[in-house]
Amino acid sequence: MSYRALYLKYRPQTFGEVAGQKAVVKTLEKSLSSGKIGHAYLFSGPRGTGKTSMARLFAKALDCEKGIGCQCGECENCRLIAEGGHPDVIEIDAASNNGVDQVRELIDHVGYAPIKSRYKVYIIDEVHMMSAAAFNALLKTLEEPPENVIFILCTTEPHKVLPTILSRCQRYEFHKLSDEEMRGKLEEVLVKEGAGYEGEAIDALIDLAEGGMRDCLSIADQMLAYSGNSLNIHDLLSVYGLTSKEEKLALLMAVAGGNASEVIGRCESYLAGGIDLRRLSKDLVQILKDALIYEKTKDASLLSRLEEEECKRLLLTFGPRKAEEAILALVEAESLYSRVDDVRNLFELTLLRMTDGEALAPKEPAPREEERKEEPVRTRPLPKEEARAIEPAPEAEVPPLPKPSPIDLEGFGSAPLLTEGEEYQLAEDDLIKVMNRAMANKREKAELSRKWELLAEIQDDPNAGLFATLLLNGKPYALSDECLLVQFDHPTDARKANIKGNQPQLRKLVGKLLGHEVFLYALRPEVRGGIYMKFNSLKVAGILPSIEEAPSLPKD
């Protein structure tokens, strides 16, 4: 026989063999034993958590020759269902059969009686991929199928299924498996395969699988082939671009010690070794979380990544407040990884921020209530002169900033706001030069930001209103003597602002706020993140261009 993948070879054949999902198993068993069998079920949850396997097991329990609720694995019905060849258990992949014509063909066959068993079971996988027309065609049949027909719909994205379909199904939520559930199943499989394994490798593999048993067994399959029927931590780290726990702890120690040179050196080695920086960020968060848990509870049984001694050693250098701030910095970086082109730069800059001793230095704790010096209790009223002497001096009033003058639109002229046309394009190097020169103009940029809201007062103007609204959708990002960079959250707005035909009116409006006109360039959100990372990388490395170097701006 040809080799079978582990997740196929060890697919559960009875409810008792299912890893996790105890609530789903118990409910289905109760419905079978009581005879309360529905006509339509929806199994939803993350990938690899057993939805399709559970659907087959339910079909087996319905059609086993030894009676409803049995899964003997010996009768012809059980064997055919396990092999995927039973004529009355029809599995449909909605990802490739999602059209209305395929659904109509299914409906035509629903009315036929089962060939070999009590029930005809339709298992529709990835049901969220069906078109709206296909859903609507299925609706009536799903609501009132023939008495001996049962539908089981499986999906990873139930929010994409029409509400009218959801309301006709019994819904079962499948959850990611716990580490203990996955560890028990994985160790059982490895023992049956006669494979050796290391406990640390099991833990790392479970982290990679992220709650999916199928992914867990697939990774184990690959590692057993790579390592010669053994699962060891060294090979797993090498194949999947991971770092050892000792390496992560050493990195955090370097960060906590403010050793920027060592941090950058380690990052270089990660890049050379093909380490997954996204995964490393998550692992660092988990380690710091363990340290915080131990610091708060002193309970080593609650730790998932570290040993008690490792927590103590880390906390000597990485205090609780440092750990909290480092976690926030890493979580912020994780949220930005998908929006930047260069993950390495972002990761390095995040670590450099964390090495800033001043930013992470623990603050002096506020004095406790009992430590505060209490005023002596006076038993007699103070003389007026003494009372006046201890009265606090009135706080000096800070005069409010003068309100900016309204925008004068005299001579603004009339022009349409274009939605299509040729756009200005600035090279990355020129954007860096603008940002570099803008550091000397922070006060003028702050004043421009204060006046920016004046644009709201002219949104109803027939000539300037649309241009003012477009600018209000963005905000000033960097201002040099010759150029204003405006950041927009929506690419469509940025594109409109960079259309050459819109620039004269936009520059006039900005000129009314600044007192002089400048070239205006809109930054799309996906560009802004990348250019910010590059600018900071150059700044940290001390290789920004000279402030005298002016950007090369388009000439009208």
Image (cartoon, rainbow, N blue to C red):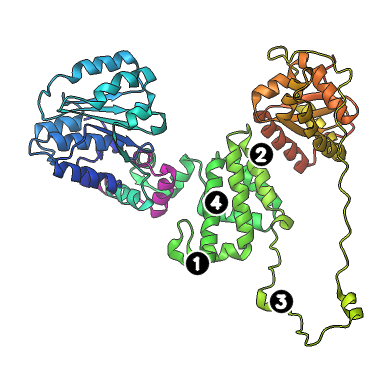
Q: Position of residue 320 (x, y in %)?
A: 60, 62
The amino acid marked with disc number 2 is Asn
Predominant secondary structure in magenta?
helix
Q: Which residue is mark 1?
A: 297
Residue 126 in sight in this render: no
Q: Earlier in the sequence, mark 2 or mark 1?
A: 1
Q: Which residue is mark 4?
A: 285
Q: Which residue is mark 3?
A: 372
Say which residue appears at 82% left-offset and 17% top-offset.
504
Q: Does 217 lie within the magenta span?
A: yes
* Image position of 549 (left or right of 351): right
Question: Element type at marker 4?
Answer: helix
Q: Earlier in the sequence, mark 4 or mark 2?
A: 4
Q: Earlier in the sequence, mark 2 or mark 3?
A: 2
Q: Position of residue 52 (x, y in %)?
A: 28, 34
Q: Quadrant of residue 406?
A: top right
Whether the residues at callouts 2 and 3 have beta carbons within 8 Å, the answer is no
Range of magenta residues:
191-219
Q: Earlier in the sequence, mark 1 or mark 3?
A: 1
Q: Quadrant of the C terminus?
A: top right
Could you give the CA–CA distance between mark 1 and mark 3, rounded to whole angstroms? 28 Å
